[in-house]
Amino acid sequence: MLKDFEKNQPEDKKAVDQEIKKLRAELLARQQKLREKKIPVLVLIEGWAAAGKGSLIKELISEIDPRFYSVVSPAYIPESESRYPFLYPYATAIPENGKIVFMDSGWMESLVRKSLTHEITANEYTRRVRAVNEFERQLRDGGYLVLKLFLHIDRKEQLERLENLCSSGDTEWRVTEADLWQHREYKNHLKAYDAFMEATSDAVKWHILDGKRRRTAIRDALKLLVDRIDKALEKDRYCGEPFEEKFPLIDMPLLKDVDLSPTIPDEEYDKELKKLQKHLSELHNVIYRKKIPVILCYEGWDAAGKGGNIRRVAYPLDPRGFDVRPIASPEPHELNRQYLWRFWTRLPRTGHICIFDRTWYGRVMVERLEGFCSEKDWKRAYNEINEFERQLTDWGAIVLKFWIHIDQDTQLARFTDRQNTPEKQWKITDEDWRNREKWPQYEVAVDEMIQKTSTENAPWFIIESNDKKYARIRTLKIIIKALEEACEKKFREDAEP
């Protein structure tokens, strides 16, 4: 990597400029083809302070259609001020199909700096490197073209550029304390950048550019981008093969083996509901103060009682500290991105609760059964979802997943009641009846989903809901128990010297 990098030999400037002109025209021509093939492109540009990252981006975008690209500069957020997962600013910035995003520094710069400043532990650094590899591989397997460039200059060249910038009042603002610190700690940064690139080159390869020769770096970046686009256009959208990492899974029963007979008397229900909601309200204050994020995921059969269950959970919560996210069919701008994007953009801040009414599991249920994605896509999704949820729990989130379960006779009775009751008719649609006819296929898909994704860090709970009131009480008890355990763990951690 960097320690073995061989600098370019001097080249004829006119010849390099001619190549740049030619490559710009080729990039402009490829942009239209990217749109036609709906291939999204993410170009990550990392490098040393004063290496010319901004100037390189300016040259790359100079001749292409501005309607179909954007430049993103994710701000560096100190660990103590971050309210979202590490990958949040990058995962939410990915491009739509057929468009290009140029990212001015990203996960590499942020992670290396936080490691060298000891904002994160060595174990946390390792976890985040793993998350980076998962993120890049998921983008690649989902049809994204990801190009990673690093602009390299030596310590002497960096010093000259920093001094030059600081010599003018018009440019000295561009040099930060972090830039000067990076120069002072050049050797440590060199080692850290090298190690990071070695650890993150499996899914998407790093390309090192000679930042000392600006025109050559521009030429090489354009050539890499055009060549990678050509390969993507030849193969059409890439679709990764399914594979399974060994996650710690919890043994779960099949839906047909779940006893749906439990009930609760009305008098006991009213008493328990009041007591549990009061306790949940108290716990909400604690998790807000301790900045513990909570993610509650609801899936289940139509008419199983998800809405009523969610209302009983949400009622005691402070409305300023939670959101309910109803997930319907994806909008066009959501369909045009990797399927987890619309969930990354809806994550809660630390200390907040987010309740998802339907989730990312649509990938392995409705999208699978209705043919909205390929077989490779939904088979690959089990592992991708486990990785996503592990990243959330590594961040510190409580992730609980509820399958609200009823039998077919109960569903038919509730459908009929909705259809025959004017104020409830909005709840029943032709699609509900059509989905009911596919109950056996959905049951197979749900069983596989629960078996493959009920991990120790993000477990599934099958909630018996033939009696809706029993289901509400059981769900509240599960949530309260998880919140109590998380709060106790946080208190112990805070008490450690």
Image (cartoon, rainbow, N blue to C red):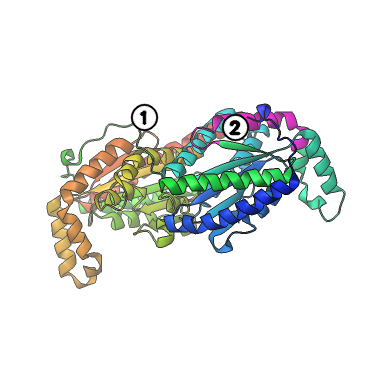
Tell me which segment is drawn in magenta. 182-205
Q: Residue furthest right?
A: 167
The mark that comes first in sequence, 2 or 1, is 2
Element marked by disc 1: loop
**Is 433 in front, or is 353?**
433
**Residue 343, percent across and down?**
43, 51
**Residue 186, percent across and down?**
74, 32
Q: Residue at x 22, y 65 (%)?
A: 429
Element marked by disc 2: helix
**Is 333 in front, or is 290?**
333
On screen, 203 above or below 463? Answer: above
- Label disc, if present, on residue 386 of the rendered structure: none
Amino acid on which the number 1 mark rests in the picture: Pro
The dominant secondary structure in magenta is: helix
**Residue 107, percent across and down?**
58, 41
In this picture, residue 71 sits left or right of residue 381: right
Give the residue number, with chain letter if any, for mark 1.
248
Decide if residue 313 is in sight here. yes
Residue 472 colored magenta?
no
Q: Residue at x 29, y 57 (%)?
A: 308
Give the residue number, with chain letter if any, for mark 2.
196
In this picture, residue 186 sits left or right of residue 229: right
Q: Count neighbours of disc 2 (C-alpha within 10 A) and say few if under 14, some if 14 to 19, many if 20 or more.
A: some
